[in-house]
């Protein structure tokens, strides 16, 4: 059990490319922290630096109260689950799970007991003698989990562990991993590019883009108060609508002349970006905004209406029992639906 | 995908004309059969000849049919001591060949694997240069460097020893190259997982790399064993002591006596010895064929 602290950690590759700008944060003991971002944003690099698989260019990584910069991965007391499972193909499930313990000189009886205990927790008992190639994707993923938990590490590291699974299994494993991590109370870092995984699993989310941290917060904070247009559009499905508009005289005006309701401008004038989540909108004949619907997407539980507002792309999510037709419609907003961002930097205003 | 649909479409008309002779196949088969005969008839002739006494062979040449001296010839070839010093028989030569073949194959695999391991997994400053230097030695087989190699071995007083026979042949660019390609195909995550599991370089090599390379090792073993077994020039040069003669060398020794003009060479025995020399490599290839193919074509990852 341990907290993880990164202090001004930076990664520059020998060719001069900066994979990660100086980053500082702490993951409290027992939390599951998800690093999320598009590919190439530096999330895996960050994880691999904590694991010790990648050199740290600058700064300090601590696990517990120990600075681990110069400590070998094997001695950091961590366990990692890889995207392609990375099971040893020539070893049985039991030997796969026990290999790390064997290398640490634990005696056989003790290893067998720990492996059995982990296997029971993961419903793998009947597969202990099989080879990884005889298991399904989900079972292999569980073996990889088992290999991590038998070690009783201070920290779990997950590197996109669910990306190789099909959608249904992914949902199921997501819940299993979350439940397991809660039960064991082990601190975990979890890398994913899937924002649904991030929202559902995390105690705390770190959103990364282009090698810098955009925002750190609970799933709720990230959703309700995105710190930038990047976070606003990356987190949440369907993504938040972003409209360019003009602030002045205490209100925000869309290019067509419609005034965005609820938008306080905090003294800001000039071009701004207005963010509105598709699910924060209610179709209403008395609404202040006009949407020209082009396409209706049926999702089952809800419908997505795609169209134009003030000449810019805009989507609205309506419940399945609400009739929808293409053409013009009026929209009202739920309270607190409007987010304002700076036009150049995309930073949140107010 | 395209291939699968193509064969399915083609399969239907093929079934209806199955009984007709495919003339293009006849040509192919004629070539294959001719090739096979070219390889096998000499073997058959040696086998048949090994059942005749040396006088008949000397007078009538090699034989297609069987004679009555089969038992005598093989018995003599295997168990009769011969040579200049009467210190060597077929069994000794068989053992020597076996030692050479095994030592050669095992040595090459060990050296090749370790060289490939160093090149692939360690950040050596001149790893690429080292690899290409090793690779270049493919162009320098033993025959090219045979005089200096002989000098070195005789200077080290290793003439007439198994060490002298095997060690100069052990360095192998072929094995290094194949193992390098194989190691590079092993996923990076496996290495990282092993690192986190606390496996150091030696443990990783023994616990993970060697078992994963099993089929590859088998394939290399077959190639190298046969290659070592058939070595002729180097053993001829390095062994003057008859008790160290290999089979391939021994065959020549029997025929040699003709050149000395002393007596009629034991052609029958020579032929028997040739058959004996051929057998172990053939058996190895036959028994390990499936491993061999697996090692060179697929990888269990």
Image (cartoon, coloured by chain):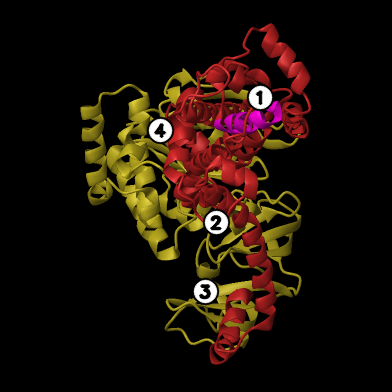
Q: Nearer the viewer, mark 3 or mark 4?
A: 4
Question: Disc 2 versus disc 4: distance between alpha carbons?
Answer: 26 Å
Q: Nearer the viewer, mark 3 or mark 2?
A: 2
Counting from the top left corner in percent of width and height, residue A216 is at 53, 42
Question: Disc 3 versus disc 1: distance between alpha carbons?
Answer: 87 Å
Question: Which structural element holds mark 4?
Answer: strand
- The verdict on a common chain for dots 4 and 1 is no
Question: Disc 1 versus disc 2: distance between alpha carbons?
Answer: 77 Å
Question: Disc 4 versus disc 1: distance between alpha carbons?
Answer: 64 Å
Question: Disc 3 versus disc 2: distance between alpha carbons?
Answer: 16 Å
Q: Which span is picked out in magenta?
A: B247-261
Residue beneath disc 4:
A155
Marks 3 & 4, CB-CB < 8 Å contact:
no
**Chain containing the residue with disc 4:** A
Say which quadrant the N terminus of chain B sits in.
Answer: bottom right
**Chain containing the residue with disc 2:** A
- The verdict on a common chain for dots 3 and 1 is no
Residue beneath disc 1:
B236
Question: Disc 3 versus disc 4: distance between alpha carbons?
Answer: 39 Å
Q: Is residue B100 visible?
A: yes
Shown in yellow, the chain is A
């Amino acid at each position: 059990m341990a907290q993880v602290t990164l202090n001004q950690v930076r990664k520059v590759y020998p060719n001069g490319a900066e994979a990660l700008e100086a980053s500082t944060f702490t993951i409290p003991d027992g939390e599951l922290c998800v690093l999320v971002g598009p590919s190439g944003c530096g999330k895996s690099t960050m994880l691999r630096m904590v694991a010790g698989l990648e050199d740290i260019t600058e700064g300090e990584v601590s696990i517990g109260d120990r600075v681990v910069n110069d400590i070998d991965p094997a001695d950091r007391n961590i366990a990692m689950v890889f995207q392609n499972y990375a099971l040893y193909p020539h070893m049985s499930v039991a030997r796969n799970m026990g290999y790390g313990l064997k290398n640490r000189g634990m005696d056989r009886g003790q290893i067998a007991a720990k492996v059995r205990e982990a296997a029971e927790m993961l419903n793998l008992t009947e597969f202990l003698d099989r080879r990884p190639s005889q298991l399904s994707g989900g079972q292999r993923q569980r073996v990889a989990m088992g290999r991590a938990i038998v070690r009783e590490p201070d920290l779990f590291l997950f590197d996109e562990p669910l990306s190789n699974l099909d959608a249904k299994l992914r949902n199921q494993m997501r819940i299993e991993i979350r439940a397991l991590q809660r039960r064991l109370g082990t601190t975990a870092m979890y890398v994913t590019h899937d924002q649904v995984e991030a929202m559902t699993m995390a105690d705390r989310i770190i959103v990364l883009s282009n090698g810098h941290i955009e925002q750190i917060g609970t799933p709720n904070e990230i959703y309700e108060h995105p710190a930038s247009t990047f976070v606003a559009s990356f987190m949440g499905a369907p993504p938040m609508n972003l409209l360019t508009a003009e602030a002045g005289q205490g209100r925000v005006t869309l290019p067509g002349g419609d005034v965005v309701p609820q938008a306080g401008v905090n003294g800001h004038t000039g071009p701004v970006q207005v963010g509105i989540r598709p699910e924060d909108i209610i179709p209403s004949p008395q609404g202040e905004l006009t949407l020209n619907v082009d396409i209706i997407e049926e999702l089952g539980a809800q419908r997505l209406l795609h169209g134009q507002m003030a000449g810019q792309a805009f989507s609205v999510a309506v419940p399945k029992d609400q009739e929808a037709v293409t053409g013009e419609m009026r929209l009202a907003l739920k309270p607190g639906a409007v987010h304002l961002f700076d036009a150049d930097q995309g930073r949140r205003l107010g | 995908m395209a291939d699968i649909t193509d064969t399915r479409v083609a399969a239907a008309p093929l079934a209806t004309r199955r009984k007709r002779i495919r003339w293009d196949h006849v040509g192919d088969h004629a070539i294959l059969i001719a090739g096979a005969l070219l390889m096998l008839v000499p073997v058959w002739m040696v086998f048949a000849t090994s059942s005749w006494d040396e006088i008949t062979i000397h007078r009538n040449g090699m034989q297609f049919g069987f004679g009555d001296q089969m038992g005598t010839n093989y018995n003599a070839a295997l168990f009769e001591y011969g040579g200049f010093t009467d210190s060597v028989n077929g069994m000794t030569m068989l053992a020597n060949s076996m030692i050479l073949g095994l030592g050669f194959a095992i040595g090459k695999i060990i050296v090749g694997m370790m060289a490939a391991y160093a090149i692939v997994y360690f950040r050596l400053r001149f790893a690429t240069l080292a690899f290409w230097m090793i690779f270049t030695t493919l162009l320098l087989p033993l025959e090219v460097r045979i005089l200096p190699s002989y000098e070195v071995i005789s200077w080290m007083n290793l003439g007439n020893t198994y060490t002298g026979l095997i060690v100069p042949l052990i360095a192998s660019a072929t094995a290094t190259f194949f193992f390098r390609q194989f190691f590079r195909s092993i996923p990076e995550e496996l290495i990282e997982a092993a690192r986190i599991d606390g496996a150091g370089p030696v443990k990783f090599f023994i616990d993970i790399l060697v078992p994963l390379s099993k089929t590859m090792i088998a394939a290399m073993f077959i190639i190298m064993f046969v290659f070592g077994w058939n070595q002729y020039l180097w053993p001829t040069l390095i062994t003057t002591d008859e008790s160290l003669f290999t089979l391939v060398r021994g065959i020549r020794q029997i025929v040699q006596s003709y050149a000395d003009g002393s007596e009629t060479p034991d052609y029958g025995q020579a032929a028997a010895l040739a058959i004996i020399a051929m057998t172990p490599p053939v058996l190895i290839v036959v028994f390990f064929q499936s491993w061999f193919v697996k090692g060179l074509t697929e990888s269990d990852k």
